[in-house]
Amino acid sequence: GEGKVISIDPARAEITIEHGDIEGVMIGMTMPFTASDPRLLEGLAPGAAIEFDVEQRGDRHFVTAIRSR
């Protein structure tokens, strides 16, 4: 997916992303994701433009990779 970082909660390993449609996964929206590894959130700040990979596990979505755009 592609989007913008809205907020980061390192204590919960959570990142809220405003993103466009992620084909085959979900429509565009703003939502929190759990990082599969809290280190993925290091160096990020609200407003950053990112590309990210997401994996669905049950009813939850986890960010597994983040790249700056």
Image (tube, grey):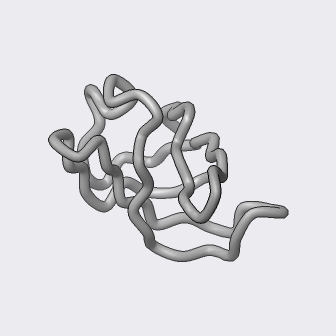
Residue at image location 81% in from the left, 62% down from the top: 23
Residue 20, above or below 53: below
Residue 42: percent from left, percent from top: 27, 27
Residue 63, above or below 27: above
Residue at image location 36% in from the left, 47% down from the top: 48
Residue 63: percent from left, percent from top: 52, 43
Residue 18: percent from left, percent from top: 46, 66
Residue at image location 83% in from the left, 63% down from the top: 24
Residue 37, above or below 9: above
Does 22 sit left or right of 38 as displayed?
A: right
On the image, which quarter does residue 32 sit in? bottom left
Residue at image location 54% in from the left, 59% down from the top: 60
On the image, which quarter does residue 53 sit in? top right
Does 67 sit left or right of 45 as displayed?
A: right
Q: Number of callouts in the render?
A: 0
Of residues 52 and 11, which is closer to you in this image?
11
Does 10 sit left or right of 27 as displayed?
A: left
Of residues 47 and 22, which is closer to you in this image?
22
In this view, the residue farthest toward the right is: 24
In this view, the residue farthest toward the top is: 39
In this view, the residue farthest toward the left is: 11
